[in-house]
Image (cartoon, rainbow, N blue to C red):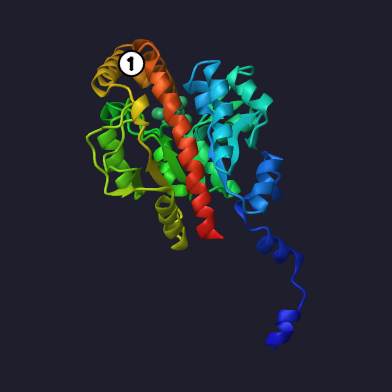
Amino acid sequence: LLRRACRAPIPLSRCLSTANSSPLALARSRNAPVDIHPEVEEALATNKPVVALETALVSHGVPYPTNLELGLELENLVRSTGCVPATIGFIGGRVKIGLEKHEVERLAEKTFKPSKISRRDVAAAIAMKADGGTTCSTTLIFAALAGIKVFATGGLGGVHRGAESTMDISADLHELTRCPVGLVSGGVKSILDIGKTLEYLETLGVPVLTYGESKEFPAFFSRHSGFEVPWNVPDPSIAAAVLHAQWQLGMNNGALIAVPVPEEHAADGATIQKIIDQAVAESEANGVSRRGKEATPWLLDRINTLSQGKSLKSNIALLKNTAIVGGQIAVQYHKLAD
Ligand code: PSU
Ligand code: MN
């Protein structure tokens, strides 16, 4: 009886539900507005390592034309490690996993006034046919959807200073509990309350690892925050082993891998801290700190002005470095997962 059951033709509905059970196939079967760049699609199909990149930094984080150069350069750096880059963004209300150069240009030049798209904005942006730069949270969502395991960026959002009264806590943190993606970044932006952000990540059960020699969590523009995390990974293969162990166990959350800004590009800690304190105080005085998603871009811009461009230079150096480290980790991860 068993043998006959095995030989019985599988009904089409069951074929679809088993063969097409990946989240991406499911989204496609519903005709979801998601386009995967052919190069990315091919890499995923043939098991080549892919690294996701975000676009909120192109549309909102970095001024033109540096944002454009940077967006393209990060892709090249990912390529230099042997991975395929998948820059994620919204073009005319479609989710693009892998952008064409002219699409990166369109976001960088703000041709169609791109929105800054966090998880809560996704569906509205699609319905309104909007362009948009994806924050870490949205980039995590679509990296996970496509099965991309590593995402490289600059700074994760987090718990803002004064969050006890503004409740400003980035959706990036919760997204790390939902998406099995290793997020490689320079830590969280130092405009944030780093101590509270680390506590929050601990509560959420998100692994936080520092990359390199020290357990000290980096402070984005500088290498020192004064906060230690429990685990430090010395190289890409150990970082990859952590991700692999996590997902082998079916613990389908993400992990934060914090890579300190390279020494030679670090801003002087004390000076940049004073500037950040001033910018945060100004944002509280002028009400920007209570204007939701405007807070982060405003602060970054203000800090750049006050530091006469130094903070942007550190930001760029840090981003380039995370693109390389992210690529190296993705290469190692694929060796374990194959
Ligand atoms: N780091 C930067 N520039 C940025 C961001 C981070 O140097 O523009 C973006 C990231 O996309 C991050 C977002 O996900 O800011 C967080 O915004 P918010 O605090 O509003 O959640
Ligand atoms: Mn916020």
* 186 or 21, nearer to the observer: 186
Q: Is residue 137 visible?
A: no
* Residue that badge 1 annotates: 283
Q: Name the spot of residue 133 as percent of width and height, x first.
A: 55, 28
* 289 or 245, nearer to the observer: 245
Q: Is residue 293 visible?
A: yes
Q: Residue at x 49, y 36 (%)?
A: 323
**Which quadrant holds residue 228?**
top left
The quadrant of the picture showing ligand 2 is top left
Looking at the image, residue 324 lies above or below residue 304: below
Looking at the image, residue 203 lies above or below residue 324: below
Secondary structure state at the residue bearing disc 1: helix
Circle 1 packing at 10 Å, graded few (<14), some (14-19), many (20+), is some
Q: Residue at x 26, y 39 (%)?
A: 216
Q: Name the spot of residue 304 as percent of width and height, x first.
A: 39, 15
Q: Residue at x 59, y 27 (%)?
A: 72
What kind of residue is marked 1? Ser
* 321 or 152, nearer to the observer: 321
Q: Quadrant of the N terminus?
A: bottom right
Looking at the image, residue 6 lies above or below residue 162: below
Q: Name the spot of residue 294 as percent of width and height, x first.
A: 43, 20
Q: Residue at x 60, y 47 (%)?
A: 146
Horizontal side of residue 82 vs 325, given as left or right: right
Q: Name the spot of residue 120 as percent of width and height, x first.
A: 50, 34
